[in-house]
Image: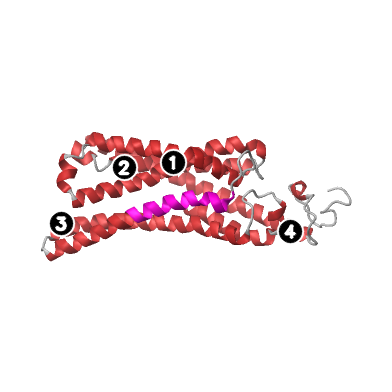
Amino acid sequence: MPDGGLFSNCSEHYPFENYFVNCTNTTRPCELIHDFAIVAQLLSILDFYISSVLFLLTGILNVYFLWITVPLYLSFNDETKKRYIFVISRCISSISAAVTLLILRCILYVYFPPETSNYYLYAIVIIADDISFYSLQGSYIGMATLLYIGVIHPVYFSTRLTLRKIKIFAGINVIIAALISFPCGALQTATYVPGPIECGSQHCVIVVSTAFALTIMILSFVFICLSFHIHQAKKLGNYVSSQTLHHARIGLGWTLTAIIVISLAEGIPSSFLIGLKADSVLNTCNNFYQADRLVNVTVFTSIDSIVW
């Protein structure tokens, strides 16, 4: 740093000081640049190294699960295959999400802090990740819907709901995910990188929150219906049916719990940002002036990635 610069009297210097040389509306630049360095270090450890390892492990586990499931699926009759279409769809979406999130972490690490010239690179990866995310959400909804129809309307499930129709629904799920992801991905990119589109996280987070809320409502509805039918089966003395429904409810309950935990992990960082009035693009004077408070936000945002 040249003599007379904003950080010339600081005992420690950092490579990203040039982003904040014009942020002169503070009497403690050395403290703030040190706090900002802590934020950068936390992002590196929590949001890159730990998250990347977890995404890699998740991808490997889902590839293994898919490798086991596909041969089983091919050996089933059409009636049994109907129950596994969205299981395979969920697995493929999970692999795709893990890969795109891993790529995004690598891009964030290489191009940190993000700049305008990186906007379209980020946009491509984030849109691909959104397609995986929304198709994964759709797969959960599809599994819950099939479970509901199979329990409440078993005759319709067996005779009218063909394997071909379910495959079409699975394809429509991916198409809808893509249609949602292109505009949403462009807006979400604007929360990471300065570019042709501007959108604060306070506004762009609404789309993600809506997707989670819809999934939770549908899974909760099916969970309540299953609980009611278990109670009815026990009253009628049909313990075989109640045990089958009980196992289905346990699986659905774990899925619902996972979605709720992920929703909380998504919501907590956003609520911190709204209360803090921070910019989503990290290298701004507004964030520099609040660097000491951004440490907590960074921790919770990284927890979001780890939970994913």
Q: Is residue 198 above or below residue 219?
A: above
Question: From mark 3 to mark 1, how far is it between C-alphas?
Answer: 35 Å
Q: Earlier in the sequence, mark 4 or mark 1?
A: 4
Question: From mark 1 to mark 2, how far is it between C-alphas?
Answer: 14 Å
- Residue 241: numbered disc: 3
Q: Nearer the viewer, residue 244 or 160?
A: 160
Q: Which residue is mark 2?
A: 86
Q: Earlier in the sequence, mark 4 or mark 3?
A: 4
Figure quadrant of residue 213: bottom left
Query: What secondary structure is found at the residue carrying circle 3?
Result: helix
Q: Earlier in the sequence, mark 3 or mark 1?
A: 1
Question: From mark 4 to mark 1, how far is it between C-alphas?
Answer: 38 Å
User: Residue 78, can we see it?
Assistant: yes
Q: Which residue is mark 1?
A: 132
- Image x and y of residue 1, in percent: 83, 48
Query: What secondary structure is found at the residue carrying circle 4?
Result: helix
Residue type, numbered disc 2: Phe
* Residue drawn at point x = 38 percent, y = 52 percent: 214
Residues in magenta? 200-218
Q: Is residue 28 above or below residue 215?
A: below
Instruction: Kindly check if marks 2 and 4 are in contact, taking CB atoms under 8 A apart as contact.
Output: no
Count of labels in the image: 4
Residue type, numbered disc 1: Ser
Q: Which residue is mark 4?
A: 32
Is residue 208 left or right of 40 when viewed as pictured?
left
Mark 4: few/some/many CA within 10 Å (<14, 14-19, 20+): some
Mark 1: few/some/many CA within 10 Å (<14, 14-19, 20+): many
Mark 2: few/some/many CA within 10 Å (<14, 14-19, 20+): many
- Image x and y of residue 261, in percent: 43, 58
Mark 3: few/some/many CA within 10 Å (<14, 14-19, 20+): some
